Image (cartoon, grey):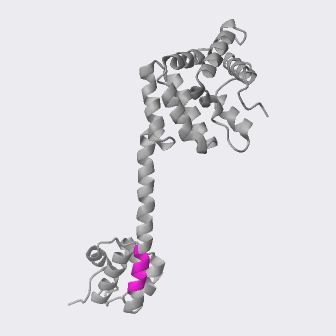
């Protein structure tokens, strides 16, 4: 009776593929058994045990390069090595969990880049009559504000939350969004600029929406990137913003000037 089993049987018993068995041989993790009189390699209990041990450690996350020394070590180093593998696996699990959470946030859209309260405001804007384009513009401005002036962003959100409760502020904001398509010299631009400036001056708590986004460094640059986001040069929107800022400066309000 022939002792041992074929490579196919050994692979099946160890729950791996023949290709994997040969890879283990190539790496020196499992000795390749001698051929029998028929020219076939026969795997005995020792080889099968080693295959199972290697497969088990590999499945547990031990790098193949570490398995050989690990199996050949004494009990204490073996336990220490396994503890190290466990630490690495724990760190990897934490990393994968964080990646999974990020995927969930990506699936939820705005929550990847903005806090929940900002998302709630964006979701509520359509109920106030804002268009999808208005919401997109607000979203982009929020993202820029959070990135460029992070230390003021929470206060900025609070100011907007309060202002959105004021029907006049909502009306002016929607009117300002509607200037897209107007000619820059349209007389309605100057009229709207006057209305907006007067409203801000009469409501200092809302004025901080304009003045509050002033960073400690590169103030003018950061302010203009946020306040003038999406404006085209020489457009009605650009003229409106410039007129409002000019009127506020004339009233003594500190508004950053272009660099």
What x and y, as percent, mark residue 221?
A: 73, 37
Instruction: Report the magenta stretch's main SS.
Output: helix
Per the image, is 205 magenta? Answer: no
Instruction: Specify whether 175 is left or right of 33.
Output: right
Report which quarter residue 23 is drawn in.
bottom left
Exactly how many numbered labels are in the figure?
Answer: 0
- Residue 128: tell me if it is visible: yes
Instruction: Specify whether 107 is left or right of 217.
Output: left
The C terminus is located in which quarter? top right
Residue found 42% across the figure and 40% down from its top: 108
Instruction: Specify whether 34 is left or right of 234.
Output: left
- State the residue lying farthest toward the top: 187
What x and y, as percent, mark residue 238?
A: 70, 21
- Residue 31: tell me if it is visible: no
What x and y, as percent, mark residue 105?
A: 43, 45
Query: Depth check: 163 or 137 in front?
Result: 163
The residues colored magenta run 79-86
Query: Depth check: 42 or 188 in front?
Result: 188
Instruction: Specify whether 12 is left or right of 148.
Output: left
Residue found 35% across the figure and 86% down from its top: 39
- Work out whether 8 lies above or below 149: below
What x and y, as percent, mark residue 112?
A: 48, 43
- Work out whether 31 lies above or below 185: below
Query: Depth check: 153 or 5 in front?
Result: 153
């Amino acid at each position: 009776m022939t002792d041992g089993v074929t490579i196919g049987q050994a692979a099946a018993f160890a729950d791996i593929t023949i290709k994997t068995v040969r890879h283990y041989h190539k790496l020196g993790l499992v000795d390749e058994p001698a051929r029998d009189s028929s020219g076939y390699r026969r795997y005995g209990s020792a080889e099968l045990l080693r295959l199972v041990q290697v497969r088990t450690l590999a499945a547990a996350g031990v790098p193949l390069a570490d398995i050989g020394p690990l199996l050949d070590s004494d009990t204490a180093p073996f336990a220490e090595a396994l503890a190290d593998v466990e630490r690495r696996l724990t760190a990897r699990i934490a990393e994968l969990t964080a990646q999974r959470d990020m995927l969930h946030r990506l699936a939820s859209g705005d929550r990847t880049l903005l806090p929940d309260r900002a998302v709630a405001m964006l979701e509520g804007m359509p109920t106030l009559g804002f268009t999808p384009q208005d919401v997109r513009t607000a979203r982009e401005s929020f993202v820029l504000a959070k990135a460029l002036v992070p230390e003021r962003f929470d206060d900025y959100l609070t100011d907007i939350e309060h202002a959105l409760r004021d029907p006049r502020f909502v009306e002016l904001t929607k009117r300002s969004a509607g200037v897209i398509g107007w000619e820059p010299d349209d007389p309605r631009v100057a009229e709207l600029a006057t209305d907006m400036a007067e409203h801000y001056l009469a409501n200092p708590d809302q004025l901080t929406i304009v003045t509050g986004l002033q960073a400690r460094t590169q103030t003018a640059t950061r302010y203009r990137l946020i306040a003038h986001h999406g404006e085209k040069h020489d457009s009605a929107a650009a003229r409106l913003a410039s007129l409002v800022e000019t009127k506020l400066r004339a009233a003594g309000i500190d508004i950053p000037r272009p660099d």
